[in-house]
């Protein structure tokens, strides 16, 4: 075996890992680590596991077997998928599968019809039929019925025998295999380092599969979460049970205090679950004091609305459940829209900036008009522009029934009681460190809450009721905690409360979740005109949270440190660096640090408790800071070690920047893989959040050669072709692993592999080129090299059903369509694929060609869906032969599925029809087999059938 190269350097099952990553993402709070606390951009654990195993496993002269063994270890092979299966088929579904598959016909006799319902005989070998039916499914359907790879306790004995025979190991689980592979490669157990540990995915997974771990981060919240991941989830189940009892003890103690205060109960003894508040302001046109919200619909399932009635220059509220359709329609209108406030009394609209009294100074800069709050304030002054009021409460009876109502006298008294408690104790609590005194410092995210509400200190992001609960909880857990583990559990619960219970918590009226949402539903600090507050009862699951149990026995070290100052050595550095200003971790984490600082300093004596924003990797000094960091890591890694850098896939300019940074750091590119983890966006801004994570694999730079730029172009061309050819040879034709964006990415990496293999390129000034790639990418030599590599890649990935000559004759827009359709035939519906094609073929306005642009459901329009509409946004397509052929299909369908009508249209529209006849046949041939593809049949049925009929008449057409 050649152990010089690792498996990940030669191949990687990107399609399967993408699908498994997406499955893990969609688990939301069911993910292993997310329940411990909020962090932004955690990488899927399955991706981390795959990267580590890919680095440890050797690449041999039998690549097919290498892939087979890798898939077995990831439980992504057929046996592993069957082992992961946890859902059973319904009898009806099982019967349908048996009927569709000839190989399963022997089981058909076990099914019978009973009054129109399919049933299965008791004598049937149900498990055998289940397994046989499962084997007929595609990969997506299989993983939908099973656990995630990390949830599988172990692989089968047969699998371990096969793995050990091939790798010459003697392992019975992943921990043992990790240690044995480590000894073969490094002579000791592998040390995995991560100097940007963030939410802890990389250190946790490395430790869970048996690696020794070094983890560091500049940010204390990242350190806290990583410590919790390893030390809490890594505990025995017995110790975790004790911690969960501690959570219950704290909650019960706080609940007793809240109950004694009587601030969450109404006159009937019912307990509040949620409170809904809104902002109020005075209409500058008519002087009415008006409540503000984009919608007064409280609950879609319960048909609950807030109805406002004028009362002496202001408004009273009535909350009504079971509202009529007319009342719901009226409630949805709201009093705020994108243009500003809309007064329900005078009907006039006023921009929010005018309400806030924003103005321009003499230099044209905006001066925001809201008053800045003082440190001792927690509510608006009576003369502030924006006031707040409670307008709805969700209660729960002793029997568990829930209902809404508008606040009555008792509710208002409860509110005033809470306000007085906070007002009389705030200064004292702040001195005791129970309530934040931290200023909100100006920044990209924080400026929003400063200008939109005037808040100046972090405690002002919470109302009186929220402050009181947070304070009571913090004081209680600190008094009851008996060790570091309990203090950390208390802190995690406090942070969960802060995330789910602030004035930045949106109220959701969706049928499945009529409740308050988390503050950080996205990577921002968003203010709302109406917001949710949870009672203690409403936060029970927030305070008492699940800790997943995965005992860890590896050596681990976690510290807070600037990555430039790391002194620990690692065999594998796997990092997910903060890329420029993509996420302002230091600003967002200050939200939690304001509550945590005093406890962190007491619990972790050698830690600091501020976000060190001055040292954060961002802004103008980003590139130089990254070079210093990765130079340090290169100096602290094993000579035979690897680095895997994870970053969000972007354009060639970004690639050029990152490559130059790594090159200057003494690293050379080995390969790159793109893992797609697309999810639909939720919340306010609907659309696609396209998530693609690139794994850039690097080694220490060992080359001493010097080259000239014009000399290496041919080397790059050959390396691109070699890489793509290898991928195509290894690909599974029945269930493709690689899509076109993967080939483009491989081309990027191949070009950078050649570039970074040289110590120096005579006519290339790295510092100058790095600056060019950032500030003027269109004139960067390195960007041009990468762009050219992409063109080489597209020349190499001609659809298998297309003749090379005809392919070259197509316009770029036609190639975009054909490649997109080919991708759909392989079951790829990721919007990122189309975005890549659009960039690769240099076309804009491609939305006109798309039937859907939803993440994971994106697809092209069929000829019938295009109809005879103009495609002027894509003139390259509008004026193409393909467009005429598609219109011919449409005309034929509209004329009672008559192909002759379609042919007449095409011949009338194309003057040189006989010269183009073979190309027309090529285009139609590409559409014919679509009807046989199950995932495309429904929307392509008529168009594909007509393409087949039209192909026949074109073939037999004669002069």
Image (cartoon, rainbow, N blue to C red):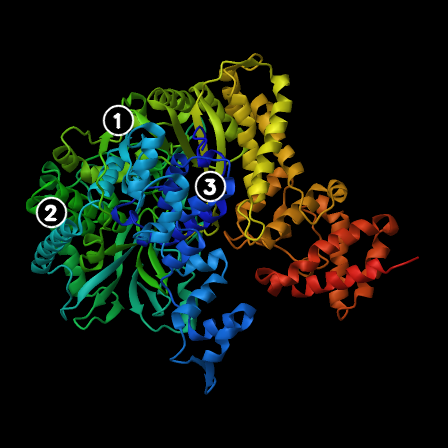
Mark 2 → mark 1, Cα distance in angstroms:
28 Å
Which of 346 and 531 lies nearest the eye of the viewer?
Answer: 531
Distance between the Cα atoms at labels 3 and 1? 38 Å
Between label 2 and label 1, give the one nearer the viewer.
1
Q: Disc 2 or disc 3, which is closer to the eye?
A: 3
Crowd around label 2: few <14 · some 14–19 · many ≥20 (10 Å)? many
Rendered residue at 45%/63% (across/down): 134
Q: Is residue 839 above or below residue 819?
A: above
Q: Position of residue 237 (x, y in %)?
A: 17, 52
Q: Label 2, label 3: how many angstroms apart (C-alpha)?
A: 51 Å
Which residue is at a point 17% across and 46% down the rendered structure image? 489
Q: Which mark is residue 796?
A: none
Q: Is residue 328 above or below residue 233?
A: below
- Per the rendering, the mark at residue 66 is 3
Q: Which residue is mark 2?
A: 477
Q: At which x and y percent is residue 169? A: 34, 40
Q: Is 667 situated left or right of 467 in this image?
A: right
Image x and y of residue 406, in percent: 25, 65
């Amino acid at each position: 075996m050649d152990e010089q190269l690792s498996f990940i350097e030669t191949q990687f099952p990107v399609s399967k890992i993408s699908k498994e990553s997406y499955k893990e993402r969609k688990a939301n709070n069911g993910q292993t680590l997310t329940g411990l606390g909020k962090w932004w951009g955690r990488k899927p654990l399955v991706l981390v596991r795959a990267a580590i195993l890919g680095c440890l496993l050797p690449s041999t002269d039998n690549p097919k077997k290498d892939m087979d063994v890798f898939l077995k270890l990831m439980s992504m092979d057929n046996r592993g998928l069957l082992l992961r299966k946890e859902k059973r088929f319904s009898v009806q579904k099982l019967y349908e599968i048996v009927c569709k598959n000839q190989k399963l016909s022997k089981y058909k006799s076990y099914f019978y019809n009973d009054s129109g319902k399919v049933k299965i005989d008791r004598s049937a070998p149900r498990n055998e039929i289940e397994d046989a039916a499962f084997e007929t499914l595609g990969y997506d359907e299989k993983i939908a019925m099973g656990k995630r790879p990390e949830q599988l306790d172990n692989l089968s004995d047969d699998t371990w025998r096969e793995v050990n025979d091939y790798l010459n190991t003697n392992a019975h689980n992943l921990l043992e295999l990790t240690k044995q592979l480590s000894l073969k490669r490094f002579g000791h157990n592998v040390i995995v380092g991560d100097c940007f540990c963030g939410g802890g995915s990389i250190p946790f997974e490395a430790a869970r599969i048996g690696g020794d771990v070094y983890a560091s981060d500049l940010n204390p919240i990242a350190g806290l979460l990583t410590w919790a991941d390893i030390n809490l989830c890594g505990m025995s189940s017995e110790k975790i049970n004790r911690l969960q009892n501690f959570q219950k003890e704290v909650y019960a103690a706080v609940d007793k205090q809240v109950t004694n205060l009587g601030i969450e109960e109404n006159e009937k003894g019912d307990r509040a679950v949620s409170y809904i508040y809104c902002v109020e302001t005075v209409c500058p046109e008519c002087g009415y004091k008006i409540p503000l919200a984009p919608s007064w619909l409280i609950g879609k399932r319960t048909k609950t609305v807030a109805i406002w009635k004028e009362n002496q220059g202001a408004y009273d509220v009535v909350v009504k459940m079971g509202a009529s359709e007319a009342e719901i329609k009226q409630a949805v209108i709201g009093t705020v829209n994108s243009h500003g406030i809309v007064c329900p009394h005078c009907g006039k609209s006023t921009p929010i900036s005018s309400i806030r009294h924003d103005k321009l100074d003499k230099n044209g800069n905006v001066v925001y008009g809201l008053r800045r709050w003082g440190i001792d304030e927690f509510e608006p002054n009576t003369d502030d522009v924006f006031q707040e009021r409670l307008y709805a409460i969700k209660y729960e009876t002793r029997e568990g029934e829930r209902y809404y109502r508008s606040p009555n006298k008792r509710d208002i008294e409860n509110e005033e009681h809470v306000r007085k408690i906070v007002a009389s104790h705030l200064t004292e609590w702040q001195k005791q460190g129970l309530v934040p005194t931290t200023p909100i410092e100006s920044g990209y995210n924080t400026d929003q809450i400063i200008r939109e509400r005037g808040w100046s200190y972090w405690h002002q992001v919470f109302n009186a009721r929220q402050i009181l609960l947070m304070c009571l909880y913090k004081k209680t857990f600190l008094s009851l905690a008996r060790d570091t583990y309990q203090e950390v559990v208390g802190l995690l619960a406090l942070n969960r409360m802060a995330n789910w219970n602030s004035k930045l918590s949106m109220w959701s009226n969706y049928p499945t979740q009529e409740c308050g949402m988390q503050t950080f539903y996205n990577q921002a600090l968003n203010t709302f005109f109406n917001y949710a507050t949870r009672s203690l009862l409403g936060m029970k699951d927030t305070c008492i949270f699940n800790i997943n149990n995965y005992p860890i026995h590896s050596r681990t070290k976690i510290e807070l440190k600037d990555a430039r100052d790391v002194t620990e050595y690692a065999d594998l550095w796997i990092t997910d660096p903060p890329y420029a200003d993509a996420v302002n971790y230091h600003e967002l984490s200050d939200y939690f640090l304001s509550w945590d600082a005093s406890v962190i300093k007491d619990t972790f004596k050698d830690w600091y408790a501020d976000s060190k924003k001055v040292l954060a990797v961002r802004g103008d000094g980003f590139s130089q800071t990254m070079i210093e960091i990765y130079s340090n890591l290169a100096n602290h890694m094993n000579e035979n070690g690897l680095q895997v850098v994870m970053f969000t896939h972007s354009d060639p300019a970004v690639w050029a920047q990152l490559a130059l940074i790594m090159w200057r750091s003494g690293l050379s590119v080995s390969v790159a893989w793109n893992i797609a983890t697309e999810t639909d966006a939720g919340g306010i801004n609907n659309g696609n959040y396209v998530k693609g994570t690139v794994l850039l694999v690097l080694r220490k730079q060992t080359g001493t050669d010097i080259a000239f730029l014009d000399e290496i172009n041919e080397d790059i061309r050959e390396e691109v072709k070699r890489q793509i050819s290898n991928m195509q040879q290894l690909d599974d034709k029945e269930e493709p692993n690689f899509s076109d964006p993967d080939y483009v990415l491989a081309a990027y990496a191949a070009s950078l592999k050649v570039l970074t293999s040289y110590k120096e390129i005579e006519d290339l000034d790295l510092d100058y080129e790095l600056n060019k790639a950032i500030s003027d990418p269109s004139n960067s030599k390195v960007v041009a090299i990468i762009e050219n590599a992409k063109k080489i890649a597209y020349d190499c990935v001609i659809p298998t059903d297309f003749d090379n000559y005809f392919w070259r004759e197509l316009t770029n827009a036609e190639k975009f369509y054909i490649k997109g359709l080919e991708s759909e035939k392989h079951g790829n519906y990721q919007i990122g694929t189309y975005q890549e094609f659009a960039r690769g073929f240099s076309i804009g306005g491609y939305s006109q060609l798309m039937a859907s642009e939803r993440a994971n459901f994106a697809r092209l329009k069929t000829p019938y869906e295009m109809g005879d509409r103009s495609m002027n946004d894509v003139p390259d397509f509008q004026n193409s032969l393909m467009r005429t052929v598609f219109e011919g299909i449409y005309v034929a369908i509209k004329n009672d599925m008559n192909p002759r009508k379609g042919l007449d249209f095409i011949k009338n529209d194309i003057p040189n029809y006989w010269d183009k006849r073979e190309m027309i046949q090529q285009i139609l041939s590409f559409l014919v087999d679509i009807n046989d593809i199950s995932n495309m049949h429904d929307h392509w049925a008529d168009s594909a059938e007509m393409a087949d009929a039209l192909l026949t008449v074109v073939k037999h057409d004669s002069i």
